[in-house]
Image (tube, rainbow, N blue to C red):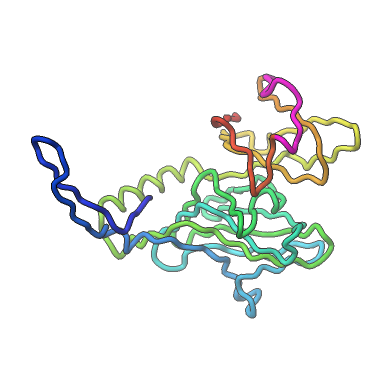
Amino acid sequence: MDIQAFGVKQTRDPKTNEVVGEEYFLNPLADYVKPYTLVPRNADLNPTDPEQIIVPASGQSADVMLDMVDEGIFEGAYFTAQYLDDAAPAMLVELIDNQRRVSLTGRPCHVTTVIGTGQRPFVLPESLLIDKNQPIICRFYDLSGNENKVRFQIHGQRMYSEQIRDARLDAYIKRRQERNRHMSMYLCPLDVDPTIAAGATGDYYYTNDSNIYFEVRKIMVYATGAFKYFVFDEKNNGMQTGWLHSQGALGVAQYPFIFYGPWMIR
């Protein structure tokens, strides 16, 4: 919901349609829809640094909740993170919608491909709606063999709907809640992480949630080396005229490759 604090009301001459006067006004919703950042509730697990999630060496972090404990609905649009090792964080992340008991990541994904950093936020393909006491659960898995620490945030807007009864705000929240019942953000990894030997080829699939429709809007990769790839849809139609080099057409989390139009996977 795009809320501008100040606006301009113009008065026009009914005959010439020329502007004959302007009046500045304050949008009454601006006090009740504000930018907001959701930080994990981790004080019990890490009381000295509660926004920091500890990932044990070669292990899994505790399940950490991101939720609204006070009034208001939160609509998230961006992920950011800060890692103990900013250069090359070696972790997987898994996100779960605890209210609907569905995964938002299919299976654990490498953090480089789905979170980004504070300097380069990851823009969600679909905004994430979190109502009061309806948490998102995140957990991290270490790949480095060393203890990792991560600060993870979701940025968006908070709607203080209990403080104001406005038809526009109520209608917007209702539309978002109805949409959220049928559609949610989703980060879809391959069924398995590819391991490609030098000079070898292999076939890999996106089928681990084959009972739903998935609309692909952008694609990204984390890889330790360069490779070429070719994409086929479920009807075996090629999605390109020839092999593409990974560095030229897959992008990374900070700079994803955005499709010309959505690609629907059944």
Q: Nearer the viewer, residue 171 or 30?
A: 30
* Principal secondary structure, stretch drawn in magenta: loop
- Determine the residue positioned at 83% across, 31% down: 202
Residue 185 vertical position relative to residue 156 in the rendered view, above or below:
above
- In terms of depth relative to the viewer, which is nearer, 136 or 76? 76
Q: Is residue 129 left or right of residue 94?
A: left
Residue 163: quadrant of the picture = bottom left
The residue at the point 72 percent across, 62 percent down is: 86
In the image, taking residue 88 as reference, residue 174 lies left or right, namely left
Q: Residue at x 37, y 45 (%)?
A: 175
Task: Please indicate whether residue 216 sits to the left or right of residue 179 in the image.
Answer: right
Q: Residue 37, image x and y in percent?
A: 50, 63
Residue 135: x %, y % from top left = 53, 60
Q: Residue furthest bottom?
A: 48
Query: In the rendered image, which quarter is residue 53 located in?
Result: bottom right
Above-or-below relation of 175 to 88: above
- Is residue 212 visible to us here? no
From this viewpoint, which residue is outermost toward the right? 198
Quadrant of the image for the C terminus? top right
Q: Is residue 155 visible?
A: yes
The span shown in magenta is 236-248
Residue 112 spot, x, y in % from top left: 70, 52
Residue 243 in magenta? yes
Query: Furthest-left residue in view?
Result: 15
